[in-house]
Image (tube, grey):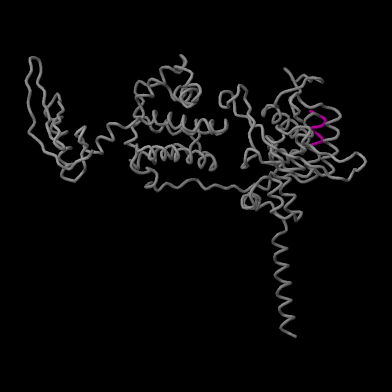
Amino acid sequence: MTTYDVQFWDIEERKGARKTSYRVRWVAGGVKHGDSFTTKGLAESFRSKLLTAAREGVPFDAASGLPEPMLREQNSRTWYQHACEFVDMKWPRASGKHRKGIAESLATVTEALLVGDRGGPSREQVRAALYGWAFKANERAAGPPPAEHEAAVRWLADNTVRLAAMCDPALMRKALDALSLKLDGTAAAASTVARKRVIFYGALAYAVELGRLPVHPLHGVKWIAPQNDDEVDRRVVANPAQAERLLLGVREDTPELEAFFAGMYYSALRPEELLHVQDAQCELPSASEPEAWGWWHLSGATVAVGEGWGDGDGAHESRSLKHRGRKATRSVPIPPAEVAILRRHREQFRPGRDGRLFVSRRGPGGRYFDTWPGTTIPNNSYTTVWSRVRARVLMPVEAASPLAGRPYDLRHACLSLWLNAGVAPTQVAEWAGNSVRVLLKVYAKCIYGQTDLALRRIAEALAEGMRSAAK
């Protein structure tokens, strides 16, 4: 219960056998309160704060006798405590990859919210404790921190700012600036900054929701985020001849991955979709129809999340298609050139134990196992193959450029080809698993010939108008 009925008495001096104390006394809502201090100056400072609050019409809490802002600050959790609770709230419904992103973002901003570094662990130890234990809900629930993180966790619990201090715009600007830098101090990518800011914003919104903050602290901060350029760099887009050379190079280097990369180039599939697809979900036409098309019938994705972030024991987790419901599916066409590659893949390599079409078939030292059922292909495995093949088959000037620098650039090449071929953006977006807005925003610079086409159509319209006027 709050009250505006507050009365104050003079400071009482209490002389003891060994020391003298000074007691501040007041009444709030008919309830007597008091607090003792070791010096008169401290007592006068505290009493002055109470008097100022009463004169400004701030409500007092009758039970504690404190003005509401002081009570809120006294009861305020530290940022570390709140961040851990935010992780616990998000953990059950978040994917492994999102959990990892939350931990990374909160670890970055926590470094900017320390009250000091005196007597504290190193920056590396702080990040290791946050990322490796504190912001892993399952690890914290299992018990105390391991020995290597114990000292850092104990120090962090007492050395982050209280939530009440988060209303300081200067502190919030400091936190946002921290999100815009990488560990080495260089500028982070705009997309990374945007992703981390969303998570930090959500953590503060959760504090408002729980009544731990009166307003959202970021609303009053005029901070300009780095401009996010989502458009694909047309220099990474391989033309059909270059893509064919690259796929042929993969066939010669690591034949079991040729069809994997072909799925990205010919059907614009994401790597995680190919890692998830089963043999039964790859519909190929009869061998007697060499010009016929096939179809992918996608039902999910297998994403690399790292050990300890998913609900299982492995480093990968299966989830729904990107931006789709749990039971959603998507069908994507397979052109004849890709059909031939997939047919050859089926003849040479049997599916994994769970029916997946693309599984790891290499052991230690790169040794190939013909009958090994296989597990999920590690990301660093297929990216290493791609880097090796790219360096070998591309001309020096091409290899020195961004051309097809990542396997994912094959998907960019496919979608650019479809759009330049005149396929309706709505159809391309459906096959790609994107929205039309995102598709056109990302691939705007990769659509060739649109200016000439637009000018020709305008000229034709003007000519038609002149002919009509002359009649």
What residue is at 15 percent from the left and 33 percent from the top?
31
Quadrant assignment for the C terminus: bottom right
Q: Is residue 73 left or right of residue 223?
A: left
Horizontal and vertical percent position of residue 63:
21, 33
* Residue 252 painted magenta: yes
Q: Residue furthest right?
A: 288
Horizontal and vertical percent position of residue 188:
52, 38
Horizontal and vertical percent position of residue 1:
23, 38
| Along the line of sight, the residue nearer the viewer: 92 or 156 | 92
Q: Is residue 181 left or right of residue 280?
A: left
* Residue 289 painted magenta: no
Q: Is residue 379 left or right of residue 353?
A: left
| Along the line of sight, the residue nearer the viewer: 5 or 447 | 5
Residue 183 visible here = no
| Along the line of sight, the residue nearer the viewer: 220 or 339 | 339
Q: Quadrant of residue 23?
A: top left
Q: Is residue 279 left or right of residue 329?
A: right
Look at the picture and state if 445 lies above or below 471.
above
The residue range painted magenta reads 247-254
Look at the picture and state if 96 lies above or below 443.
above
Q: Residue furthest bottom?
A: 471
